[in-house]
Image (tube, rainbow, N blue to C red):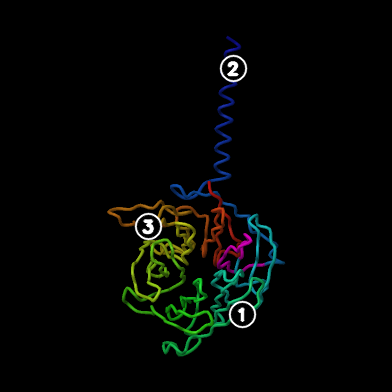
Amino acid sequence: MQRRNFLRKAGLATAGFAIAKDMFAYKKDPVYGHNNMRYRMDVKWGQLNPEKYPVNDCHEMVQDRRGRIILLTNETKNNILIYNKSGKLLQSWGHEFPGAHGLTLHRAGGEEYLFITDTNRHQVFKTTLDGKILLTIDVPLETGVYESKEAFVPTETTVLDNGDFYIADGYGSQYVIHYDEKGNIKNYFGGKGNTTANLDNAHGITIDRRQADMTLLVTDRTRNCFKRFSMDGKLIEVIELPGACVCRPVIQGDYLYAAVLRSPNLQAEKTGFVTILDKQNKVVSNIGGTAPVYKDDKLQQMAQAEKIFVHPHDVCVDDDGNLYVAQWASGKVYPYKFSRA
């Protein structure tokens, strides 16, 4: 009898320890997101000595061919910080971009280049990976729709394989301008206005190759949506994202990722999250946000559910499927890493 009581008490103690251990593990290492797109967060991944390598707004991030994670910040002590995937700083450069905002990587002829938009300087720059400026784009006065450089406040670029590129003037006059490789204007579309084909806060742009025909996805952040255009600027589709002031679209494989700066329906700052859409442009996961719900094939209002972000501004997806989230106006925090759960 004594032996049975001892074994029973020992078993209860072991079970209690296991439950307590599981609860502690959950609190220490929670999982965020929904469906098959769930992640664990590492807020310490990119932390550096702010006296030596400060950041202001962490605006955007890309991964190069060597697997390095490149961060753009509008801190002129070091506009570019280059990490490995473990969060170790490898290199830093850049003092001349006070309005550094958009960062796009382009591969051509065995080389890689960066396109940087500067909202303070009203310019776009093509650079080498170590910061040498190869091309500068100023206000496109030749279009006839701009009267001063102040009207041109570019926020993002995307680049074709042949070197042609598009600039989204997301904080300015809301046009998307198409250039050839040398910087000559070929076309423009969008602009401010009340029609569906017009844009309001055209914050981001990318090329979507997930379907048979290559198209452009352009952010319309004020209207909480992405808009799909043909490569020559004809509106094809509106992807409604109620409750989500989305930043730029980022495509990796079949999925589209976007930082949500805030939820406008909450009428408050500090309400951001990250959203993930599948190949059919259905939301499948919200990191830090409410679960996506569709009724009669219509996405219902989304909002922040967990306060893990302040103002997320961009998502970088590495070649292992990990996410890196940069934030704007968030206490000068370094990027967070999210690993698949």
Which residue is denoted by mark 2 in the rendering?
A: 7
Kind of residue indicated by mark 2: Leu
- Residue at 58%, 35% in the rendered image: 21
Which residue is denoted by mark 3 in the rendering?
A: 280
Work out whether residue 206 or residue 333 is closer to the camera in this orientation and state it.
206
Work out whether residue 286 or residue 23 is closer to the camera in this orientation and state it.
286
Q: Earlier in the sequence, mark 1 or mark 3?
A: 1
Kindly give the residue lying farthest to the front in the view shown: 109
Structural distance between the alpha carbons of marks 1 and 3: 38 Å
Kind of residue indicated by mark 1: Leu
Query: Which quadrant of the figure contains the N terminus?
Result: top right
Element marked by disc 2:
helix
Which residue is denoted by mark 1 in the rendering?
A: 134
Q: Earlier in the sequence, mark 1 or mark 2?
A: 2
Is there CB contact under 8 Å for labels 1 and 2?
A: no
Q: Earlier in the sequence, mark 2 or mark 3?
A: 2
Residue 204 — which label? none
Q: Position of residue 61 (x, y in %)?
A: 57, 65
Structural distance between the alpha carbons of marks 1 and 2: 75 Å
Question: Splitting the image into 4 quarters, where does residue 235 fall?
Answer: bottom left
Kind of residue indicated by mark 3: Gln
Q: Tell me if residue 265 comes above or below residue 36 in the rendering.
A: below
Q: Position of residue 100 (x, y in %)?
A: 58, 74
Does the magenta run of residues contain 139?
Answer: no
Badge 1 local density, few (<14 within 10 Å), some, or many (20+)? Answer: few
Q: Position of residue 35 (x, y in %)?
A: 43, 47
Badge 3 local density, few (<14 within 10 Å), some, or many (20+)? Answer: few
What is the total number of numbered labels drawn onto the structure image?
A: 3
Is there CB contact under 8 Å for labels 2 and 3?
A: no
Give the magenta range. 54-70
Q: Tell me if residue 293 comes above or below residue 161 in the rendering.
A: above
Structural distance between the alpha carbons of marks 2 and 3: 56 Å
